[in-house]
Amino acid sequence: MKTRLSVNVNAVAVLRNRRDLPWPSVTGLARIALETGAKGITVHPRPDERHIRGQDVRDLADLIRSDFTGKELCLEGYPDNRFLALCEEARPDQVLFVPDDPSQQTSDHGWDFEANDGLLRRSVDVIKNSGMKVSLFVNPEPDQPAKAAAVGADRIEVYTGPYGACYADDALAVTRLAEVAATANAAKEAGLGVNAGHDLTPENLPALMKEVPFIREVSIGHGFIAEALIYGFEETVRRFQRAMSEL
Ligand SMILES: CC(=O)[C@@H](O)[C@H](O)COP(=O)(O)O
Ligand SMILES: NCC(=O)COP(=O)(O)O
């Protein structure tokens, strides 16, 4: 089973929103990524619409549904009524619930399952009853996947930010990678699919894929856009695929 690459295009919307103009085009660049071989698009429509807006979600859902059979849309967000309503409207293939406070700069931690048990059970039910996959963002701690399974998740997404941040410290990277791998193995034992995301790059992906070859999907945004500014979207998809040994 090959690991799927889902390109997160939040940062394209950051650039687009600098002016009251429709370029760079979120759907246009998503199309290039999908035509080049990415298996999906991920977006995080945050409450303040600092980057991805509700209309971007609708446009991406229409694009993938009409032109890219077999490719997937993943929506990420905190399960408030606004986000759940957007998921019901757009019907993505997968929803990732993250515990983000609206004021957070980015997603930088997984769920506190004890404190959010009722919210997660209700929200997971809403999405699964509508026929969409549910993934829950978890810290790289092996006791977390069982808690995700207990509230009904289909998958977890292991937060790989601490691993990605070790780009200059090989010893620490080994430790952080072991934490990710232990969490992924615990999820597999709990019968959950395993996704991974946050601060992944062509440099840190090979070791991750070697250690955890059963990852179903990696979603990559910040590192993807950083590469694409140098190499362009098409070549950057290929660079990530090589790093994932897809080619
Ligand atoms: C869930 C995750 O780790 C990222 O997709 C995050 O949602 C990115 O959000 P920003 O692009 O707003 O930093
Ligand atoms: N779920 C992770 C994601 O979609 C992208 O995270 P990042 O690569 O922007 O850190």
Image (tube, rainbow, N blue to C red):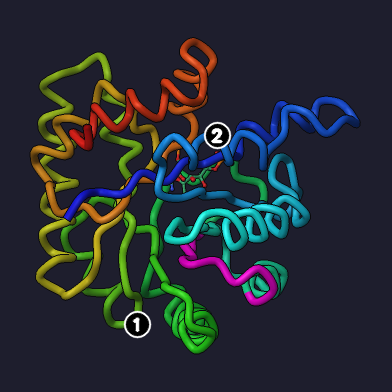
Three-letter code for the amino acid on which mark 1 is drawn: Gly
Quadrant of the rendered structure where residue 18 is?
top right
Q: Residue at x 40, y 30 (%)?
A: 237
In reply to whether residue 93 is colored magenta, the answer given is yes
Residue 243 image offset from top left, x and y in percent: 24, 28
In reply to whether residue 209 is colored magenta, the answer given is no
User: Which numbered marker is on residue 217?
Assistant: none
Q: As displayed, is residue 240 above or below residue 83?
A: above
Residue furthest top in the image: 230
In front: mark 2 or mark 1?
2
Q: Residue at x 57, y 49 (%)?
A: 43
Q: Residue at x 42, y 60 (%)?
A: 70
- Specify whether 102 is left or right of 182: right
Residue range in magenta is: 88-99
> Which quadrant is the C terminus positioned in?
top left
How busy is the neighbourhood of tag 2: few (under 14 within 10 Å), some, or many (20 plus)?
some
- Specify whether 200 is left or right of 117: left
Secondary structure, mark 1, is loop
Q: Nearer the viewer, residue 145 or 188?
A: 188
Quadrant of the rendered structure where residue 197 is?
top left
Residue furthest right in the image: 20
Cα distance, mark 2 to mark 1? 35 Å
> Which quadrant is the N terminus positioned in?
bottom left
Query: Which residue is disc 2 drawn over?
Result: 32
- Identify the mark nearer the N-term, 2 or 1: 2
Q: As displayed, is residue 243 above or below residue 84?
A: above
Q: Residue at x 90, y 31 (%)?
A: 20
Query: Which residue is disc 1 drawn over?
Result: 152
Secondary structure, mark 2, is helix
